[in-house]
Image (spheres, rainbow, N blue to C red):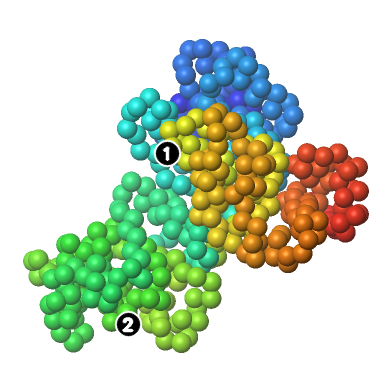
Amino acid sequence: MKPIVFLGCPPQERLETEKALGAADVSVVWADSVQLALAELQRRDVPVLLDLSRGAAALQSVRDIRSQRASALLFAVVDSRRPDLTIEAVLAGMADVFARPLSGRRVANAIERELSVDARHRGVNAQASGDDLYAHSEAMRAVSAVIERASTMRAGVLIRGEDGTGRQLAARAIHTAQNGAHGAFVAVNCAAFETEQLDVELFGGAAARAHNGKDGPGGLERVSRQSRLHEAQGGTLYLQNLADAPTRVQARLARVLRDREARLVETGETIGFDVRPMAGVEPGFEASVQDGRVREDLFRRVSAIAFDMPPLRNRREDIPALVNCFVRQICASLGVPPKMLSRPALSLISALPWRGNAPEMRALIKNIVVGLQGGRGIGLDDVLVHVKLDAGSVVFANGGTLKEARARFERDYIAAILEQHHGRISDAARALGIQRTNLYRKMRSLRVHRDRRQ
């Protein structure tokens, strides 16, 4: 099991926390003080998870541990209702930040990722775990709740969302929660193949050629052992760009999912098919059913459960932890130590429109890290160098003089930071690196209004 020291976890949460971590093969040692945590670190080099619910006092614990064990691997758990603590955790150099309720799998994946980073720095070949869904925002907590419910069923799942919103990650999370290490997760991009190629990919070459793939009128579909459908037996078949699949292929898929049986080409025997279908589609996908591009019977099979993945711009509370994860992943891939983010840099990244969602963010972070000189951290100027000031940006879309562009930037930037902190002036001023009085003055001069949500 992967050991971890947990500092500051409330006693009433420990039983459930220990269960969640244990289910992911993580063992926990409880520490009620920095001294106890440091004593354990003297015995063995293990990661430390800190509960930051106490705010400034907990952050002081981070500094105390760093002063004694500068190389300690630190993680944080925060209340999702306190986005300011997520930001503080990232700025304090946490390897990852987890939102309550704590996911044992997320913690285990983060530990594996950081251990693989350390191994690569030592010249050892190691594979990092895959990406995770960050659920600090209300929108993503709602998605997590649907994922949890979906993992208790075996019905088809339709996941709507823009490109880059994590549709496949959500599908994989459902699959993993239900199947664990059993059953494959097989992803097929229907837009990547011509008609015959997709037929071969899903059903196998021999199955595509024999009797048009079916045993006569009303018979079972033929499937080869060398097919993606057979590979998905007992697991999940994830279909991307389903509307681009030819009608003939859609009909065959619908029959296999309906019959839950098929004829194995190699032996001629009838085999049961236990495959859970999931599909990642664009918003408004239902229109492709209405206009006939997607068969209704196939749509029914893959949409018993349906939900939407929010775009990154609608889940800004998730951005700081996600940025931190990308920075660490990219630094590891480039073989350089993790870079620290300054507060203004993190605030600017959090305020950008992100029309391209996570892939756009990852590309920006990579450009920033590659462009850094020496061991410097990431400052505001490092971000600004790589931000495109063109018509694709909300901030700079209207042209005008430099003074006018700067005013629009400040207005939209301050408005975005206020929205991120739910209108709390103190938190927004801290993120912007200015005094409250200065923020009030800028809001009046730029005519920025705030939403006083709590």
Residue type marked 1: Ser
Q: Is residue 363 above or below residue 162?
A: above
Horizontal side, residue 52 vs residue 251: left or right: right
Which residue is drawn at the image coordinates 16% and 70% (left, top)? 205
Q: Which mark is residue 410?
A: none
Circle 1 packing at 10 Å, graded few (<14), some (14-19), many (20+), is: some
Q: Foreground residue, 9 or 403?
A: 403
Q: Which mark is residue 333?
A: 1
Residue 405 image position (x, y, % from top left): 76, 58
- Residue 315: name its quadrant: bottom right
- Secondary element under disc 2, as helix, strand or loop, is helix
Residue type marked 2: Thr
Which residue is drawn at the image coordinates 53% and 65% (left, top)? 162
Mark sitting earlier along the chain (1/2): 2
Q: Is residue 111 above or below residue 219?
A: above
Residue 419 image position (x, y, % from top left): 75, 54
Which residue is drawn at the image coordinates 90% and 55% (left, top)? 445
Residue 90 image position (x, y, % from top left): 62, 36
Q: Which mark is residue 247?
A: 2
Q: Nearer the viewer, mark 1 or mark 2?
A: 1
